[in-house]
Amino acid sequence: MSDTFFGDLLASIAERGRSLLSLRRGSLRGGSEADLGELSEALLSGRGEASGVALASAVLAGYEALGNEARLAFLNRLVAEFGCDHERLKGAIAAYAAEPSPKSVRELHFAAEPRRQELIRRLNLAPGGTAALVRMREELLGALRQDPELGVIDSDFAHLFSSWFNPGFLVLRPIDWSTPANILEKIIRYEAVHEIGTWEDLRDRLEPPDRRCFAFFHPQLVDEPLIFVEVALTTTVSGTIGELLAEDRVPIPASEATTAVFYSISNCQDGLRGISFGNFLIKQVVEKLKRDLPRLSAFVTLSPAPGFARWLTEERKHEDGSGLSASERTALAVLDNEDWLRTDFPAETLREALLAAAAHYFLEAKTASGRPRDPVARFHLGNGARLERLNWPGDTSERGLGEAHGLMVNYLYKLDDIETNHEAFATRNEVVASSQVRRYLRKTGNGRAAGRRGALPRVAANMLPGEANGAERKESAQEGGA
């Protein structure tokens, strides 16, 4: 049964329900949040399938027609009036205390569930209901900062979406130059790590034989990618984004590649923030690439370090207890010059100081919960990757310099070690890192050989800020980006 046929079927059911309920299309236009509250009560109390579809459609259409203030008022009404039945819950608690049987446990479970969750389930009956609810949560997330009480509704959405968008329901599809244009346009729009400036940029990422792109789709969001990953097939572990996106690079046959470099992972739907499927995407893509290209032996990322520059600025302010040596502080002082990349300084000395600081950042700097400070590190380490290599300069775009002074990171996905690494991180907050990364942590910064003044490593010589092809990241980059 095609998605179009199923959608048409739901629409016909909704039309029949409208006739039964004497609801006309557009009758809620100009209505209020109070009207939606009454329709929501009717939806929860109804039992008929046709009337349920019609009511769900009416509520969602009415919500779309409301202004921002009225939408916020409706969401607050859901908080105040569509929580759990407290009297029923008290009775269920008492019944469980008297006899903790499977029956009393079941009643306790249903009594504790807010009515909002059942309302959201029934709203999903409407044609296009899933997409409408994802948009609703996107707006909800935007309102949370000003109205924290709405967090209870977000918990309801997250609970339901984690089931509705279970990886078992998702479809992995390759994205290439023959993919329909409406989806390709969304790949350009949603790219959140390395901006795609033009259609020609996109073609350079999709058409060559040594490039791959894969996305997860949901049956109810047919033409909307949920998350996608861009992959470069190479013969080495790449350390700079410039070499992967260079306009003049020479593609290689896919059959010659030994390494798959995941250089961009972008979440597409803000309304699904916090619903994790990026780890499943990477693992499925690794398995598919391994089947299609048996010569591939290494699977790595080329990842940004979005919090490194901010952390280093804070660290340099605190001399006591800092992980930086005096010589490293001296070398890092050049960063105070906004145009430091074009100034005359000992590049190798700065490189050594930055890599030592980066090792401290990834291995020792922690959040209050004991996790690494860097959000991308938390994503990949949580998926079972190993912190493999620190690269400087890796991204000399304006964004890369602003976020991480040009630092980029390779995380290695070694198939035999993924589960062990995941357990180490999940249970002990252990950062599994290569000896090369840990070696930077052990260095003191004293007695390092200084490079030729003003000389940067060759890769950066022709890549000044803003000149890296397609390499500037969007402001909306989310945790989990490659």
Image (tube, grey):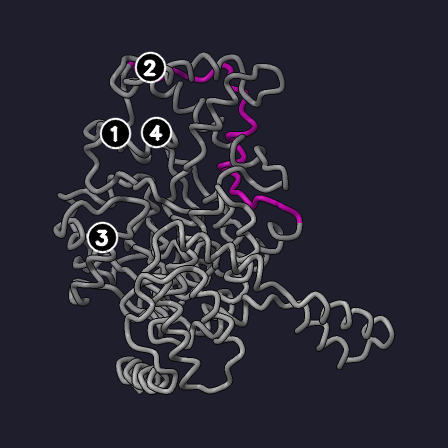
Given the image, on which type of amino acid does mark 2 rest? Asn
Cα distance between the residues tagged 4 and 2: 12 Å
Residue count near mark 4 (Cα–Cα under 10 Å), binned few <14, some 14–19, many ≥20: some
Q: Tell me the residue at 36%/68% (across/down).
A: 288
Q: Looking at the picture, how far across and down is residue 363, in whole percent? A: 56, 36
Q: Which residue is mark 2?
A: 337
Left or right of 262: which side holds 78? Answer: right
Q: Is residue 37 above or below residue 319?
A: below
Residue type at tag 1:
Ala
Residue drawn at the location 77% of the way across and 72% of the way down: 91
**Measured Cα–Cα span from mark 4 to mark 1:** 16 Å
Q: Which of the 4 image quadrants contains residue 245?
A: top left
Where disc 2 sits, the SS reads loop
Q: Which residue is mark 4?
A: 402
At x 38%, y 40%, the residue is 304
* N-term-proximal mark, 1 vs 2: 2
> Residue 1: x percent and y percent?
31, 87
Element type at mark 3: helix
Say whether disc 4 or disc 2 marks the residue closer to the N-terminus.
2
The residue carrying pointer 1 sits among few (fewer than 14), some (14 to 19) or many (20 or more) residues within 10 Å by Cα, namely many
Badge 1 is on which residue? 460
Q: Which mark is residue 188?
A: 3
Q: Position of residue 176 (x, y in %)?
A: 21, 63
Instruction: Indicate which disc, 3 or 1, sits on the residue closer to the N terminus.
Output: 3
Question: How many angstroms separate mark 4 from mark 3 (CA)?
Answer: 22 Å
The magenta stretch spans which residues?
A: 428-453
